[in-house]
């Protein structure tokens, strides 16, 4: 499977470091929001 080389065009990425504060957000998917804010946090270490 060949990936489109332009798929990431226009996106910016930031490598998060320890202590970086992520502002609250809503990705408009209740299941994903629940996972990100309640279940994924213990695995960030």
Image (cartoon, grey):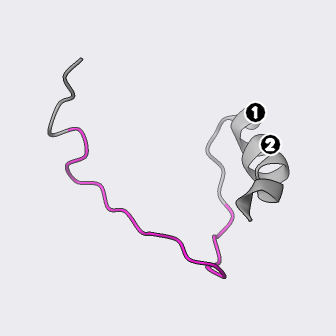
Q: Is residue 42 above or below residue 34?
A: below
Crowding at label 2, few (<14), some or many (≥20) Cα neighbours within 10 Å?
few
Q: Main secondary structure of the magenta part?
A: loop
- Number of the label disc, if any, that sits on residue 31: 1
Residue at 79 percent of width and 57 percent of height? 41
Name the residue that disc number 2 marks. Answer: 34
| Residue that appears at 37% across and 62% down | 13
Q: Is residue 1 magenta?
A: no
Residue 43 vs residue 27: left or right?
right
Q: Position of residue 8 (x, y in %)?
A: 25, 46
Spatial CA distance of label 2 from label 1 is 5 Å
> What is the span of residues highlighted in magenta in the rendered image?
7-24
Per the image, label 2 sits on a secondary structure element best described as helix
Residue 28: image quadrant is: top right
Q: Residue furthest front?
A: 45
Instruction: Examine the image and state in which quarter residue 20 appears.
Output: bottom right
Task: Using the image, determine if residue 29 lies above or below residue 14.
Answer: above
**Whole-percent x and y of residue 39?**
83, 47
Name the mark on residue 42.
Answer: none
Name the side, left or right, on which 45 lies relative to 6.
Answer: right
Q: Is residue 45 above or below residue 20?
A: above
């Amino acid at each position: 499977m060949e990936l489109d080389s332009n798929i990431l065009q226009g996106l910016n990425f930031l490598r998060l470091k320890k202590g970086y504060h992520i502002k609250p957000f809503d990705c408009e998917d209740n299941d994903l929001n629940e996972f990100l804010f309640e279940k994924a946090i213990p695995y960030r270490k």
